[in-house]
Image: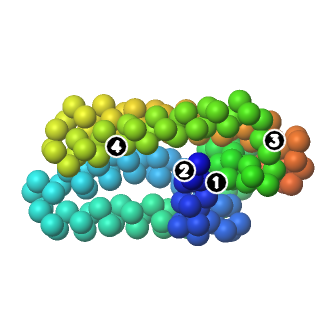
Amino acid sequence: MTDYGNIAARLFQMDERTWERHASPWSVWTRVASLPLLLAAIWSHAWLGLWALLPVVLVILWLWLNPRLFPAPARTDTWSAKATFGERVWLNRKTIPIPGHHTRMAHLLTMASALGFAVALVGALLNDWLPTVSGGLIAWFAKMWFCDRMVWLYDEMKDKHPPYAEWLRVGQKEVR
């Protein structure tokens, strides 16, 4: 089976510093919001013709720049940071094995997200709202569920592989 996650990580050139910055909630949540932007950019071919490639390229450029733009967060005990840590654990699963229940669900959710995106892509190319919106929602919810599973995976693996626990920085509570 092709490991699309590692291919994407190589394409996005995610080194240690980039992963640290991507743990920022600003990075995670603005990246999550990129799916509707990408579908709208594809949809725009109806008005822009070949010029629609410009907004598509801009969204893809945004996806590449996003993990580099925001500073690393002071605390990483948040859901969004743990989701990125879980993705790192997931991508490293050939070196440090992970429990099978995470592997099965991650593959299922990735397939659901990919199928939803394919439906949304066809809908955007055909300028048909129903497949664009329904496919987009399927892709988005599957990706969010995948992220939630990555939080669970990280929480489980940080205790089994101490270097993973080093990514965690707990914030200070405000004292009044």
Asked if the residue under mark 1 is in contact with the one under mark 3, i.e. CB atoms within 8 Å, the reply is no
Q: Position of residue 175 (x, y in %)?
A: 79, 40
Kind of residue indicated by mark 2: Val
4 or 2: tag closer to the N-terminus: 2
Image x and y of residue 112, in percent? 46, 34
- Figure quadrant of residue 108: top right
- Which residue is found at the position 58% from the left and 38% from the top? 107
How far, Cα to Cα, is label 3 from label 4?
32 Å
Tell which circle, 3 or 4, labels the residue nearer the N-terminal end. 4
Of marks 3 and 4, the one in the foreground: 4
The residue wearing badge 4 is: 118
* Marked residue nearer the N-terminal end (3 or 2): 2
Q: Which mark identifies residue 157? A: 3
> Label 1 near label 2: C-beta < 8 Å?
yes
Dot 1 or dot 4: first in sequence order is 1
Residue bearing the label numbered 1: 23
Q: Secondary structure at mark 4?
A: helix
What is the distance, in whole Å, between disc 3 and disc 2 at their CAs? 21 Å
Front position in the image: 100 or 11: 100
Res. 66 visible in picture: yes
Could you tell me which secondary element the residue under label 2 belongs to? Answer: helix
The residue closer to the viewer here, 117 or 149, is: 117
The amino acid pointed to by label 3 is Met
The kind of residue tagged 1 is Ala
